[in-house]
Amino acid sequence: MNYNEAFDKLNDLGQTHVLDGFNGLSADKQAELLEQIDRTDFSVLRLCSGDASVVPKGEVTPIKAMQLDEIKSEGDRFEEIGLNVITDSKVAAVLLAGGMGTRLGSDDPKGMYNIGITKDVFIFQRLIENLMDVTNKTGNWVYLFVMTSDKNHDVTVKFFNEHNFFGYNGDYVKFFKQEMAPACDYSGKVYMEEPYRIATSPNGNGGWFSSMISAGIADIVEREGIEWLNVFAVDNVLQRICDPCFIGAVVDGGFTSGAKVVRKAAPDEKVGVMCLEDGRPSIVEYYELTPELMQAKDEKGDPAYNFGVILNYLFNTKELLGVVRENMPLHRVEKKIPYISAAGEYVKPQEPNGYKFETLILDMIHLFPDCLPYEVVREHEFAPIKNKTGIDSVESARKLCELNGIVL
Ligand code: UTP
């Protein structure tokens, strides 16, 4: 793309400020900027006008979760089914590690955060240790696919290599990058993160399977006959990965997807809860939960919308191929976006200053014909690290690790 073509593309979108510093750039940087303008999909910016935070929901009704008592009584049988799936190499794990972790405030990828007290314990290390609980039991390696982004790919790959994959077999760990989307101010003008580069951010955790396809990782899935993908977030240091009992329950019930859930701590807890939406599985976000839904009761008299998702899903790969062809809703999210000001200064904002655009894995559930919400004990399986202090922080996760006998 040459300058005039770039100008025309930007002019149509009201974004010509991107070229304001063009003449002051070296030839290499000019070429880099023109190439970025050419490949950037600016269509996401359409969400800047109007109230894009409200996505209309269909009719919400309760979904039946498999609760702890049932899991306890059927546990041995589920475990055996799940162990067979793992031993037959029919399941792989997908670690979503492309996020920016802005709330934690570290410039490194979240997985590199050291939560150790008496020794080094990196978040990535904790996850590998959890996965190895299962691989040590079955005696075979499970593929681990790690999603990164342009922002953290190289440093993540280097970190795993430097630490010898924390004892895992590196041949079974494959990295792939997710796509990026432009970030803009509240009026819809894209920010510049360098004089020669438009500010971009990872496009959310919803595109993980299409990124796996683009990166050729889905070919491994097909070649190896992998039938299930267990997808999970980087920030839960108690995450059970490829949990045989969970896999067994999903397979035994003939489901095409499953979601680990925890019982809500309080009716107004800020967590997305599982439900049916127009008869299909779905997740209703805490801000979408009306007082009626919050107070609704099931036949036992318990809250009818009581099971929150913890970003640990099991998906059937055949079904995923159909799902990936569907359009996922795009969300506009307010974030702190570092940028180069008109005066040429680098600004790292302390408060949100604009929008990023993301698709979300929780929307994927609605594209599946069915889903098993599978209850787990919060204290044993849910220790997310989102913030520096307070709720869902390094502090709270450390306490939960100690409670579970993990030496930090
Ligand atoms: P979060 O929603 O907590 O986002 O991600 P985040 O980017 O990590 O953190 P904040 O909001 O900036 O503080 C939940 C999971 O989804 C992954 C994250 O790495 C985490 O495992 N994720 C999120 C991606 O892989 N890509 C994305 O674009 C966004």
Image (spheres, rainbow, N blue to C red):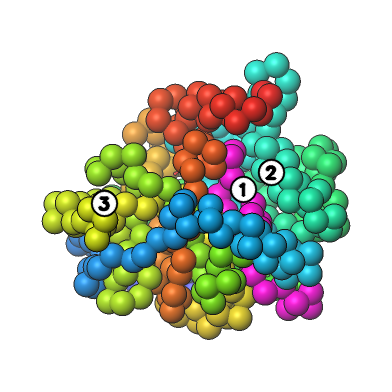
Query: Which of pointers 3 and 2 indicates the residue nearer the eye?
Result: 3
Please identify the residue farthest to the top as the structure is shown: 118
Please identify the residue farthest to the front as the structure is shown: 73
Residue at screen point 76% across, 46% down: 132
Question: Image height check: is 18 above or below 9?
Answer: above
In the rendered structure, does residue 231 fall within the stretch colored magenta?
A: yes
In the picture, measured across the screen, residue 159 lies left or right of residue 319, that is right
- Crowding near the residue tagged with mark 1, few <14, some 14–19, many ≥20 C-alpha atoms within 10 Å: many
How far apart marks 2 and 1 lie (CA) works out to 6 Å
Residue at screen point 67% across, 74% down: 227
Residue at screen point 79% across, 74% down: 224
On the image, which quarter does residue 78 sit in? Answer: bottom right
Q: Which mark is residue 302?
A: 3
- Residue 365 location, x and y as percent? 44, 68
Q: Name the residue under label 1.
A: 240
How far apart marks 3 and 2 lie (CA) works out to 32 Å
Q: Mark 2 points at which residue?
A: 130
Q: Is mark 1 within 8 Å of ligand 1?
A: no
Q: Can residue 308 be seen in this view?
A: yes
Amino acid under disc 1: Arg
